[in-house]
Image (cartoon, helix red, strand yellow):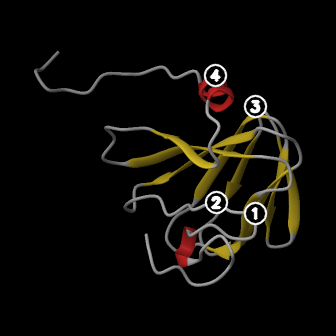
Amino acid sequence: MPIGRATGRVVDLAGVASAERGLGVVWTQEGSEDLNTNLVRFEAGEGVGIHVNDEVDVVFVGVSGSGTVVVEGEKFALEPGRMVFVPKGCLRATRSASGEFAYLSIHRRRGPVRLAPRGGTGDGIGGRSITGRRSSTV
């Protein structure tokens, strides 16, 4: 293997999700120039509020607990082992239906994640804060 070349990595996502007590992004994959991969965690009733992301397609993969991804008003159940694809430009939101709901969010790299959890009504993704107001910080 060439010096300085990246290697594969295995992460116990369910273990990380259950060990972390924070809300929002609790883990981020480091070292990829191409992908943003974030483990996102919420308690029951919390999540990411309705917003549009015009920049990238996003894949959500359930890791623990259960919740929903709403895409253009249609609800999709998200639980361990399920994936929901959301094309860029779609109105979307997530909501936890259980305590310790966690999912992996994967998309093309676009800069730092903009997720700032608080009560499940917005998140900073697409420039909106968790309350749905325009975010002034990234």
Q: Where residue 67 sits in the image (x, y, percent)? A: 84, 48
Q: Which residue is painted at 86% across and 55% down in the image?
A: 45
Q: Pointer 1: what residue?
A: 120
Q: Pointer 4: what residue?
A: 15
Callout 2: SS: loop
Q: Amino acid at mark 4?
A: Gly
Could you give the CA–CA distance between mark 1 and mark 4, rounded to whole angstroms? 23 Å
Callout 4: SS: helix
> In the image shown, does 104 or 17 lie closer to the viewer?
17
Q: Are marks 1 and 2 in contact (CB under 8 Å)?
A: yes
Could you give the CA–CA distance between mark 3 and mark 1, rounded to whole angstroms? 23 Å
Q: Are marks 3 and 1 in contact (CB under 8 Å)?
A: no
Residue 23 to residue 111: above or below: above
Residue 32 to residue 9: above or below: below
Q: Where residue 131 sits in the image (x, y, percent)? A: 69, 75
Q: In which quadrant of the rendered view does residue 118 lie? A: bottom right
| Residue at the left extreme, as displayed | 3
Mark nearest the camera among 4 and 3 is 4
Q: Pointer 3: what residue?
A: 81
Q: Where residue 39 sits in the image (x, y, percent)? A: 58, 41
Q: Badge 2: how crowded within 10 Å, few (<14), some, or many (20+)? A: many
**Image disc number at residue 88:** none
Could you give the CA–CA distance between mark 1 and mark 2, rounded to whole angstroms? 7 Å
Q: Amino acid at mark 1?
A: Gly
Q: In which quadrant of the rendered view does residue 8 lie? A: top left
Q: Are marks 2 and 4 in contact (CB under 8 Å)?
A: no
Q: Badge 3: how crowded within 10 Å, few (<14), some, or many (20+)? A: few
